[in-house]
Amino acid sequence: MRERPLPRLLAAALILAAPASLTLPASAAGQDDVLKCLGIVDNGARLACYDRTVPALRHTPQPPAAPSAPVAPAAPAVAAPVNKEQAFGAERIDRKDAPAGTVAQEAESITATLTSVSQQTVDRYTFTLDNGQVWSQVVARSIANAKPGKEVKIEKGMFGSFTMTIDGVTGIIKVRRVK
């Protein structure tokens, strides 16, 4: 059985006419011309009809858009910049305790001195640093030589985690910032 080209050509003509239909005027005359072309059975004649009708529709004057009141752009609120060290790890702590403001570029690590080490549960400690930050141990692990006065380095890990190394203590300690 021979395939009829009419449905394919009709679909192609509709696809080609679709962008033009978006700009059709509200007048019935332009729409009637397109509908007349749709009713033509001969492929060549229908295509010629579309070629005549569609360009004429594109150049018809459109009614002017309703004027809108100009909207003044809202000025973005700019917070005072924060010390990179104070902002380090603060994105996960309670917002009321977080330092106010934004940091243009956050530090990848900080170095500080332990001021106190307190045991929360068995093998879990909380560390207070000389810069006022408080970090809590995430993974339980015994830490023998963590004493005030020791130098610590806290680095960003993968997926928003943080690791702490303490001078004189072997291994790393997974921590999260509490304050």
Image (cartoon, grey):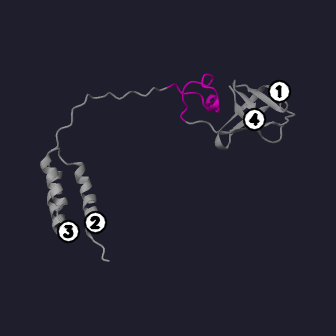
The residue segment tinted magenta is 79-104
Which of discs 2 and 3 lies nearer the camera? The answer is 2
Q: Identify the residue under disc 1.
A: 119
What label does residue 138 carry, if any? 4
Q: Is residue 14 magenta?
A: no
Q: Is residue 114 left or right of residue 159?
A: right
Amino acid type at image mark 3? Asn
In which quadrant of the rendered image does the C terminus lie?
top right
Which of discs 1 and 2 lies nearer the camera? The answer is 2
Pointer 1 or 2: first along the chain: 2
Q: Main secondary structure of the magenta part?
A: loop
Residue 99: give x, y in percent of width and height: 60, 25
Residues tagged 1 and 4 counted as in contact (Cβ below 8 A): no
Q: Is residue 72 above or below residue 161?
A: above
Residues tagged 2 and 3 counted as in contact (Cβ below 8 A): no
Amino acid type at image mark 4? Val
Pointer 2 or 3: first along the chain: 2
Q: Is residue 155 left or right of residue 22?
A: right
Residues tagged 2 and 4 counted as in contact (Cβ below 8 A): no
SS of the residue under disc 4: loop
Which of discs 2 and 4 lies nearer the camera? The answer is 2
Q: Quadrant of residue 43?
A: bottom left
Residue 134: give x, y in percent of width and height: 72, 26
Q: Identify the residue under disc 3.
A: 43
How many neighbours does mark 1 have within 10 angstroms: few (below 14), some (14-19), or many (20 or more)?
Answer: few
SS of the residue under disc 2: helix
Pointer 1 or 4: first along the chain: 1
Q: Marks 2 and 3, how far apart in space?
A: 10 Å
Q: Quadrant of residue 153?
A: top right
Q: Identify the residue under disc 2.
A: 7
Residue 131: give x, y in percent of width and height: 69, 25
Amino acid type at image mark 1? Gln
